Amino acid sequence: MRRVFVDPGAPQNDAIAEAVTWIRNGGIVALATDTLYGLAVDPFNRTAIARLFAMKSRDADRALPLIAADVAQIAAHLGGLPPAALRLAAHWPGPLTLAVPAPHALPREVTGGRSTVGVRVPAAAIARAVCAGCRTPITATSANISGEQATANPDDVERALGGRIDFLLDTGPAPGGPPSTIVDVTTTPASLIREGAIPWREIQTWLDT
């Protein structure tokens, strides 16, 4: 595993470009998201997805969350967002995941066999820059072996996964805190799947505006 430190306040473009190259070539990259460190692969690359599941010892029916650079990238690869989703997307970037219809091109393993996939635009600018460089949303499943503790500390990532991943984009400790709130925008009205960093009552206010 290769580990490169990046100053979040003055990120080195070559380090971000290296992370992008690993992902585009089927590699597994650990990077910080809104809360914890996550594992990024190309969700449309079946070989990379299979490797990620094997590395994490993850059950096949557990879907993988995605992150994206912006709404336009989501629309280009996953499909246009319905009106309710667009109202919520106006509050991105941040820890809000939307369950949207999964396109047929997305491997079944990413969705856990479901008809939807969760995606968000993260508050972490470097994570968004990696998405932009990849020109596609990327996975953001927690950087740990399934069943073990997720972490906000890049040292923990290296200790647990150093021999299993290709690249660690080290931006220092992630913010930590509650996971993202997940809202299903394929239902009418939109429905709560998991309350997390953003209270459901606040989401409802956004939907009503």
Image (cartoon, rainbow, N blue to C red):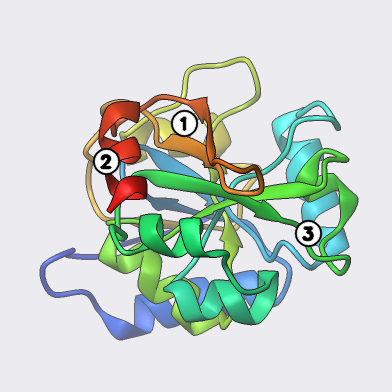
Question: Foreground residue, 171 or 5?
Answer: 171
Q: Is residue 48 above or below residue 134?
A: above
Q: Secondary structure at mark 3?
A: helix
Q: Residues within 10 Å of mark 2 (few under 14, many from 20)?
A: few
Q: Secondary structure at mark 2?
A: helix
Residue 18 seen in this snapshot: no
Separation (CA) of disc 2 from disc 1: 42 Å
Instruction: Give the percent coordinates (x, y) of residue 73.
Output: 53, 78
Under mark 1, the amino acid is Arg
Instruction: Give the percent coordinates (x, y) of residue 108.
Output: 88, 50
- Which residue is at a point 61% across and 43% down the rendered structure image? 188
Q: Are marks 1 and 3 in contact (CB under 8 Å)?
A: no
Instruction: Write down the residue under mark 2.
Output: 205
Mark 2 or 1, which is nearer the eye?
2
Question: Foreground residue, 190 or 31?
Answer: 190
Q: Mark 3 or mark 2, which has the lower sequence index?
A: 3
Instruction: Give the percent coordinates (x, y) of residue 147.
Output: 62, 15
Q: Residue furthest left?
A: 9
Under mark 2, the amino acid is Thr
Residue 208 seen in this snapshot: yes
Under mark 3, the amino acid is Ala
Separation (CA) of disc 1 from disc 3: 22 Å
Q: Is residue 141 above or below residue 60?
A: below
On the image, which quarter does residue 105 sit in? bottom right
Q: Mark 2 or mark 1, which has the lower sequence index?
A: 1
Instruction: Write down the residue under mark 3.
Output: 48
Quadrant position of the C terminus in the picture? bottom left
Q: Residues within 10 Å of mark 3 (few under 14, many from 20)?
A: many
Instruction: Write down the residue under mark 1.
Output: 159
Separation (CA) of disc 3 from disc 2: 39 Å
Q: Mark 1 or mark 3, which has the lower sequence index?
A: 3
Instruction: Give the percent coordinates (x, y) of residue 103.
Output: 80, 65
